[in-house]
Image (cartoon, helix red, strand yellow):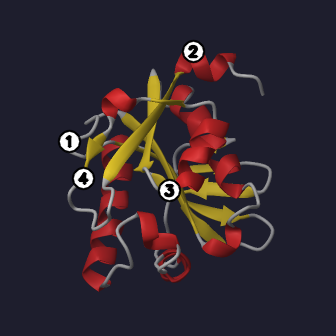
Amino acid sequence: MAEAGAGFRHETERLILRDWREEDWPEFWEGTNTPTVARWVGGVLGEAAMAEGRAKLERYARDYAHTFWCVERKEDGAILGFCGLKRCTDEEGPLGEMEAGWRFREDAWGKGYAKEAATASLELAFGRFGAEQVIAMTLKGNRPSWGLMLRLGMKRREDLDWDDPTWELDDPRVIVYAITRQEWRARDV
């Protein structure tokens, strides 16, 4: 169920995807700004970069009515990470495309939370936000992330890949997966 009006909120069986609150940020950064979680997203951030990341997510919500929303576990109110939708802002990438993305704290991995939240985000993309296609991106080495893209029914789009020299890795190749509205509706559930 998605609410309009007093901010975004969407519930799944175990999760709440919602707009960010001031009190969410310390728990979010504590759980996700770790060497293991941040390995594929640029590494552990300092205070200035965390403030910039927060500002971007808040700007996406303001400008597009969607963002990578705060993911809260219903059972205990824990902030597990983020998941949602934004517009691709990477100059070398598929600029302007609706993009699904996620980041979860390590103790939330392997429990199906990312798939549950990403499935809800894709439903919202094609239903509420009228997307014709949604992309997802990661670095080539981030097998768990692109594995989820495959489980969501997304297909590899090598024509949209690019090298991002800002990544200090041996292979800075950003790989892209995509799914169209028609493919999403036709998938085996």
Q: CA distance from mark 2 to mark 3?
A: 27 Å
Sequence-wise first label, 2 or 4: 4
Q: Quadrant of the N terminus?
A: top right
Image location (x, y in percent) of residue 184: 61, 23
Identity, as a three-letter code, of the amino acid under mark 4? Asp
What is the crowding at mark 1: few (fewer than 14 residues within 10 Å), some, or many (at least 20)? few
Q: Identify residue for label 3.
A: 142
Q: CA distance from mark 2 to mark 4?
A: 30 Å
Q: Identify residue for label 1.
A: 92
What is the crowding at mark 2: few (fewer than 14 residues within 10 Å), some, or many (at least 20)? few
Identity, as a three-letter code, of the amino acid under mark 3? Asn
Disc sitting over residue 182 in the figure: 2
Q: Identify residue for label 4.
A: 164
Q: CA distance from mark 3 to mark 4?
A: 15 Å
The residue at 52%/76% (across/down) is 36
Sequence-wise first label, 2 or 1: 1
The residue at 46%/78% (across/down) is 33
Element carrying mark 1? loop
The residue at 61%/37% (across/down) is 150
